[in-house]
Amino acid sequence: MATHYDLLIRGGVCVLPWGVEATDVGVRGGRIAALHVPADATAEETIDARGLHVLPGLIDPHVHLRDPGDASVESIPTGTKAAVLGGLVAVFDMPNTKPSIVDAERLAWKQDYVEQVAWCDMGLYVGGTKTNIAELTDLELGKGVCAIKVFAGSSTGDLMVEDDESLEKVMRSGRRRIAYHSEDEYRLQARKPMFKSGDPYSRHMEWRDEETAFLGTRRLMALAQKTRRPAHILHVSTAQELDYLKDFRDIATCEVLVNHLTQVAPDCYERLKGFGVMNPPIRGQAHMDAAWKAINDGTVDSIGSDHAPHSKAKKMLPWPDCSSGLTGVQTLVPVMLNHVNAGRLSLSRMVDLMCAGPARVYGVLGKGRLAAGYDADFTLVDMKRQRKIEESWIVSPCGWTPFAGMDITGWPTATIVRGKAVMREDEVLGSPSGKLVRFA
Ligand SMILES: [Zn+2]
């Protein structure tokens, strides 16, 4: 008797951990039951993937969904809808909301809320602060917690941990890998008087210069070595750091953002004005070239969007009063597929950076790998489809993208989360059924 599945994905080219193979995939109970499914197998539902690539479900490990905060800009329901439209099966959400996620009570609220309203699966960062150090050991083991996030520079209010003494205390509280925003706060403050309101937007990268980022990373690596606490340096933006971090592979992993691989100064500031302002800043060609070199020599472990939407009104203020942060969760996969088609990286390396990479960095269980027993998460992509990124496609309420007008080759056509299609051909399907991601 033929084997029966819940779902069969027929005729696609699968990106497996050991190579690219044309094979049919069988799903049962929300997990991958078999590869190389024979022709006589039957299923409740069959997806015809001829002409498509079947990728393990892609993950964006760096988003700010602003919830609680300002739902007219973004929220978990809208941000996760954007994620599945953009081909993502999971996003890891940052804690700098209003209020911030920094204690057991707010974490419990978010854990509960996510599983009611999210369209994709989610990991949750908890903010490390000077006042919750003693609780971090417990907080980092909470359900769905991907990591403690520390803003070592560039934050407001209670989330900043800028001095070495406090940073060392944070590192000595708990064991899992800590994710860092690495810019040296003291240097930022010291340089601020050099600039004035209304200066050109390109001044953003002069204020937050290369040494601001590199100094932050040197300080963090010294402390990580001293305490032996694993570190993940988010959004590395300089050639100096990418070179330096090669000497810390025993203790550190790192992320590069799609923006730093796609947009370059001075063009981004001249063309996008405030809509090109983010932290750490988009820099010149030499840093973009270094980022691509680090993608292709394996220095980089993961890529993310750092989706950090703001209202158009706040982005249109003069520099430096304009808010920093760019919309990006919905465009991450198309922009990366376009880079694959342009020959800048292989499809296998893109999958490594968006599946195995986040799984390794954060200790994800049961995701990030197209293999039997893993969650039946898939991103189906048409590598030949050509499409322009239009602002009207963006479902985040803020309503803009810094990639508007970009011609893309390669597009996600379906998002399948734990065996359930949640997006096909630009249509979001069913009802929100996202769950918290499991971590080691
Ligand atoms: Zn961020």
Image: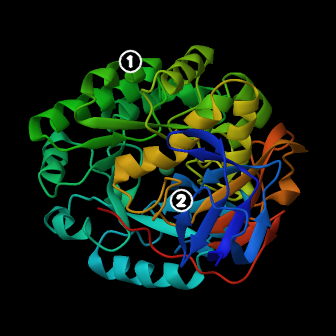
Q: Which residue is mark 1?
A: 243
Residue type at mark 1 is Asp
Provide the residue designation for mark 2: 64
Query: Which residue corresponds to the image point at 38% horizontal and 70% vertical from the top-left?
Result: 144
**Residue at the spot x=76%, y=77% of the render?**
429
Which sits in the foreground, 92 or 427? 427
Q: Is residue 382 left or right of residue 197?
A: right
x and y percentages locating residue 43 in the rendered image: 70, 77
Placement of the C terminus among the 4 image quadrants = bottom left
Q: Considering depth in this image, is 129 or 122 the residue closer to the camera?
A: 122
Say which label, 2 or 1, has the lower sequence index: 2
Q: On the image, which quarter does residue 210 sit in?
A: top left
Residue 201 in view here: no
Secondary structure category for the residue under label 2: loop
- Answer yes or no: disc 2 within 8 Å of ligand 1: yes
Q: Please indicate whether residue 76 sits to the left or right of residue 73 in the image.
A: left
> Residue at image x 87%, y 41%?
405
Quarter holding residue 427: bottom right
Instruction: Establish if 46 lies above or below 324.
Output: below
Residue 386 is left or right of residue 431, and the answer is right
Q: Secondary structure at mark 1?
A: helix
Query: How far across and down, in percent of the image, does residue 211 sit?
Result: 39, 21
